[in-house]
Image (cartoon, rainbow, N blue to C red):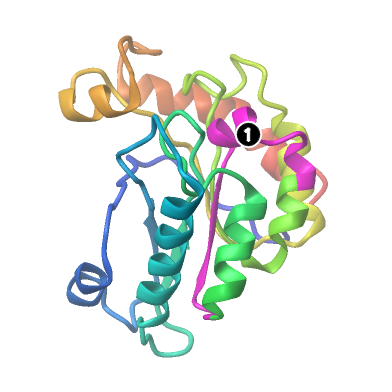
Amino acid sequence: MSRTALALVPSNVLVVGTSIVNNTVPRTAPLTTCVTLRHRETVECQPEKHKKSWQRAVAELQQLEWSEGGAKLAVEPLNRFETYFLNTAADGRRLCDEIGNPQIGILFDTFHANIEEKSMAGAIAQIGPRLTHVHLSENDRGVPGSGHIPFREVIGALRKQDYRGLAVVESFASTIREIAAATAMWRDYALSPEAFAEAAGRYLAPLLQSEQ
């Protein structure tokens, strides 16, 4: 992690199939597209259903043909209350290994990892070179540093494996009703988006800049 970038930007979650990716993402663009593989049926997970979903995801994502060095795709494991399909770093690593495309990696989100992982540093190490993008989110999606996410441990783990991608603060606002409903954001954590970003920057910037 010799080069650090903290991006305080709105998050766009893209629920996509192969045809949508092929039609919307420039294959030579210097960007990372973050994809959430979300299955709406979260109440019941049957082994056979999960197996078929897994096989379909691998087959669909293997069809992507992007030029080497172009755009990258990052799949995001979500917590068990949002999907049964992809929950942990181990799940994400296995999916990417089976796809076998170096342009497809993993988005590591501390909000979801706080629910699913035993160790933040251990999860990041398990993802290894597949790590493509990072969301630095508090345990309640509030301002980083106001909860109990071990950001110093997370940043130390990123630095240990020389992560060179973006670390983005992800949060949502209750004013956007569709997003609020999808993420159960029933209250705001700052007076304005600008105040949220400023507070997040004050807390995270020293951690990101230390020991470089």
List x then y, in percent, for residue 185.
33, 18
* Above or below, 139 relative to 45: above
User: What residue appears at the point 61 percent right and 45 percent down from the top-left corner?
Assistant: 88
* Above or below, 38 relative to 95: above
Based on the picture, tell me whether residue 22 belongs to the magenta stretch.
Answer: no
User: What residue appears at the point 32 percent right and 40 percent down from the top-left corner?
Assistant: 10
Q: Quadrant of residue 164?
A: bottom right
Q: Quadrant of residue 147?
A: top right
Q: Which region of the structure is painted magenta?
A: 101-122
Viewer-proximal residue among 93 and 54: 54
Q: Is residue 181 left or right of residue 195?
A: left
* Above or below, 198 relative to 33: above
* Above or below, 184 relative to 109: above
The residue to which callout 1 is attached is 116
User: What residue appears at the point 69 percent right and 68 percent down from the top-left corner?
Assistant: 129
Question: Are there few (<14), some (14-19), or many (20+) residues within 10 Å of tag 1?
Answer: some
List x then y, in percent, for residue 1.
72, 58
Q: Is residue 186 left or right of residue 2?
A: left
Which amino acid type is shown beneath numbered disc 1?
Glu
Viewer-proximal residue among 197 and 171: 171
Based on the picture, tell me whether residue 103 belongs to the magenta stretch.
Answer: yes
User: What residue appears at the point 59 percent right and 14 percent down from the top-left corner?
Assistant: 146
List x then y, in percent, for residue 174.
25, 18
Q: Circle 1 sits in a helix, a strand or a loop, which is it?
A: helix
